[in-house]
Image (cartoon, coloured by chain):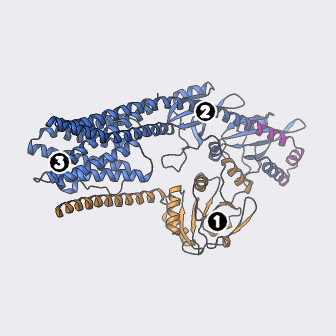
Chain colours: A blue, B orange
């Protein structure tokens, strides 16, 4: 079972606990409001109710910018009301608003929101501590402690996101758990005096607890099955990619051989008829839909480049494919070149009376466009590596615009498998993002590993399926709980009245 | 009764105040981030000023170019239509990525403006090969000699020109535009 999946479920369960704790505190405040009917109590009730809404949105992990902003509006409005309430409840030594409304002029959304949230939560803890000091209300301790722990959890939230799990993530979640548990404990001490509410909350809590257990167990089984299916799918796709690669290599080699045996090409090289050579090359390049086509003399100097006629006279004799071809062999390699970068390159010699008089070099580019085309067919994120560094990829960096070119693969298991020339499918991290990926070695004619090809599926996509299942199950259970609250409420009311009488 | 009414009014007003303040702050932050993402980072100020001086606020330079099927398109055909022209090449990584973004954008969105992606100074065969490799389905025009590129002053690629219904260049964006920025800028420019 993936660590990310476990972490995802822990996060989900914790947020549900948070929602429950805020609902309980909010309920208590609304209950007090019914007795006191004053603005101070209602502000607290509204505040905690809004925090509960935020927590539910957060637990559901609802996506989209609008929901994101809406959630934060509820959160900060809720915090504002709670702080307001604490200030109103404590007439003496009121702190000024400036500490609360400290919003930075320029910010990166989540870290700064977390910072504002931390300040607000600390303000709530501080104000309630002042209240405790003034009135010696020891019962407020769990409340103060709870908000300090939640504030610390939010502060640590600045240093991680849901896709980069680390020690901050773990400590942050532990602190949030302690904070929410402390709040529940605080409310519970009040509820012990009220039998009716106590029964209702036991009922709701038990229902939610059962639903979380059922939801998480269900999604665990589901995810295990999805992950296994994705692994099979990845292995199949990477084999299809391997087949495509082999096909392209064979195609390039065959086309290089065809052109190199053309008498027109031989004659144009021997007679230095570069215009004729250019016309033949361009026609062949267009008709055969090649990525590039270059004709060289017997010293490896470029005579004509069909894809870029103005670029010529450079010497390619150091390239493996050209070197072997100048020695009289027809070969295909996957290697780097200054003009075509990392590409499939087939070279075939042009013979005249048993002597090599020139070389035809053709091939296909392995650029981002090529991989975009592959992605459209397979739906997977595909990358091509030269040795262990990415040269082209469909993966984008965090800005969502630029490709992740140049990034190195650091997983030792992958490196070992590539050395052995084997395909490997594993759970791996890439740019601090978890993926399920298959790696395939790219082999040259001489059997050497020139690089590798990877097909990957972000684990986030698999987790989204688990989350969707979690949310649907939880929503269903919540509806059932809400529907059964009314009869339970009337039943407990009747029971408590009978006990009183 | 009146006291109760005032109390509720106070509560409603307070909620309205916080929610409005929240929306305003987040809206402002949102605009800030869009500006941050789409800022023209690739060109020094002076060069940018020179580029803008060529066509910004002026009638768009005339063009008459062929697409990959050999069909001709000229500026007059886009009269009374909003038009975005993006200049690009296959060898420039960022410019090539702009084609991927346009491809994704045009697949998903129904836009009320026309788009033409002008390839600058490359052979038609190369452009065809590039589009075929990537499976990109975008409306491309080929400026093999670079005359149109020159008349628009497009020296740094990718660069996008937002031309309104009257044929005036309303906005020039140098650098990659992602889907969000495309929506944002087209709405801002054409409405």
Q: Nearer the viewer, residue A257 or A359?
A: A257
Which residue shows up at 53% across the image and 29% down it?
A: A225
Instruction: Please state the horizontal and vertical placement of residue A300, each as a whole percent of the image.
Output: 76, 42
Look at the image and give the residue range highlighted in magenta: A248-277
The mark closer to the camera, 1 or 2, is 2
Are circles 3 and 1 on residues that touch, CB within 8 Å? no
How far apart marks 3 and 1 lie (CA) works out to: 65 Å
What residue would you read off at disc 3? Answer: A127
* Residue B153 is inside the magenta segment: no
Q: Nearer the viewer, residue A69 or A34?
A: A34
How far apart marks 1 and 2 lie (CA) works out to: 45 Å
Horizontal relation, residue A266 to residue A93: left or right: right
* Residue A270 is inside the magenta segment: yes
Q: Residue A220, relative to residue B5: is it above or below?
A: above
Q: Secondary structure at mark 2?
A: helix
The chain containing the residue under callout 3 comes to A
Instruction: Please state the horizontal and vertical placement of residue A177, each as a whole percent of the image.
Output: 30, 35
Q: Residue A254, relative to residue A88: is it above or below?
A: above
Quarter the N terminus of chain B occupies? bottom left
Q: Which mark is residue A233?
A: 2
Q: Secondary structure at mark 1?
A: helix
Instruction: Please state the horizontal and vertical placement of residue B111, each as a whole percent of the image.
Output: 58, 62
Which residue shows up at 30% across the image and 40% down it?
A: A487
What residue would you read off at disc 1? Answer: B149
Q: Main secondary structure of the magenta part?
A: helix
* Label tally: 3
């Amino acid at each position: 079972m993936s660590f990310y999946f476990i972490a995802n479920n822990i996060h989900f369960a914790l947020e549900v606990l948070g929602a429950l704790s805020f609902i309980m505190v909010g309920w208590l405040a609304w209950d007090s409001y019914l007795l006191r009917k004053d603005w101070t109590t209602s502000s607290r009730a509204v505040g905690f109710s809004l925090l509960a809404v935020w927590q539910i949105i957060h637990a559901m992990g609802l996506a989209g910018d609008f929901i994101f902003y809406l959630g934060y509006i509820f959160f900060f409005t809720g915090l504002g009301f709670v702080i307001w309430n604490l200030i109103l409840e404590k007439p003496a030594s009121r702190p000024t608003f400036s500490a609360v409304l400290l919003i930075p002029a320029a910010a990166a959304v989540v870290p700064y929101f977390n910072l504002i949230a931390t300040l607000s939560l600390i303000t709530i803890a501080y104000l309630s501590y002042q209240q405790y000091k003034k009135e010696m209300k020891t019962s407020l301790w769990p409340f103060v402690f709870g908000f300090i722990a939640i504030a610390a959890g939010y502060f640590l939230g600045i240093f991680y996101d849901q896709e980069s799990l680390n020690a901050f993530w773990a400590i942050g979640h532990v602190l949030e758990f302690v904070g929410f548990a402390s709040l529940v404990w605080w409310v519970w001490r009040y509820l012990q005096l009220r039998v009716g509410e106590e029964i209702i909350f036991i009922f709701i809590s038990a229902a939610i607890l059962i639903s979380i257990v059922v939801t998480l167990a269900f999604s665990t089984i589901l995810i295990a099955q999805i992950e296994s299916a994705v692994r099979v799918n990845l292995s199949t796709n990477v084999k299809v990619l391997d087949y495509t690669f082999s096909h392209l290599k064979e195609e390039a080699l065959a086309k290089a051989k065809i052109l190199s045996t053309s008498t027109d090409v031989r004659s144009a090289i021997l007679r230095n008829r570069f215009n004729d050579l250019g016309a033949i090359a361009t026609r062949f390049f267009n008709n055969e839909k090649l990525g590039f086509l270059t004709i060289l003399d017997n010293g490896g100097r470029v005579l004509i480049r069909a894809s870029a006629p103005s670029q010529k006279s450079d010497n390619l004799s150091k390239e493996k494919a050209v070197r072997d071809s100048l020695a009289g062999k027809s070969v295909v390699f996957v290697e780097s070149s200054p003009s075509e970068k990392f590409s499939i390159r087939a070279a075939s010699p042009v013979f005249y009376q048993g002597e090599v008089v020139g070389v035809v070099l053709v091939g296909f580019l392995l650029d981002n466009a090529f991989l975009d085309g592959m992605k459209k067919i397979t739906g997977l994120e595909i990358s091509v590596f030269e040795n262990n560094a990415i040269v082209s990829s469909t993966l984008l960096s965090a800005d969502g615009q630029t490709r992740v070119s140049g990034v190195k693969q650091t997983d030792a298991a992958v490196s070992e498998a590539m050395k052995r020339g084997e395909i490997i499918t594993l759970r791996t991290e890439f740019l601090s993002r978890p993926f399920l990926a298959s790696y395939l070695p790219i082999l040259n004619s001489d059997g050497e590993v020139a690089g590798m090809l990877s097909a990957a599926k972000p684990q986030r996509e698999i987790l989204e399926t688990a989350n969707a299942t979690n949310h649907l199950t939880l929503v269903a259970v919540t509806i059932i709980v809400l529907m059964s609250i009314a009869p339970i409420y009337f039943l407990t009311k009747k029971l408590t009245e009978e006990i009183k009488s | 009764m009146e006291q109760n009414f005032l109390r509720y009014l106070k509560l409603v007003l307070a909620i309205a105040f916080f929610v409005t303040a929240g929306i305003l702050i987040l809206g402002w932050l949102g605009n800030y981030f869009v500006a941050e993402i789409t800022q023209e980072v690739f060109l020094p100020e002076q060069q940018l000023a020179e580029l803008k001086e060529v066509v910004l606020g002026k009638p768009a330079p005339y063009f008459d170019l062929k697409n990959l099927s050999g069909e001709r398109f000229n500026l007059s055909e886009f009269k009374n239509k909003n038009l975005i022209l993006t200049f690009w090449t296959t060898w420039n990584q960022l410019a090539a990525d702009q084609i991927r973004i346009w491809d994704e954008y045009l697949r998903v969105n129904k836009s009320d403006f026309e788009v033409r992606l002008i390839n600058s100074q490359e052979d038609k065969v190369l452009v065809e090969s590039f589009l075929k490799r990537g499976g990109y389905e975008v409306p491309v025009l080929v400026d093999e000699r670079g005359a149109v590129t020159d008349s628009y002053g497009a020296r740094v690629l990718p660069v996008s020109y937002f031309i309104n219904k009257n044929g005036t260049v309303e906005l020039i964006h140098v650098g990659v535009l992602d889907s969000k920025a495309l929506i944002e800028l087209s709405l801002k420019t054409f409405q």
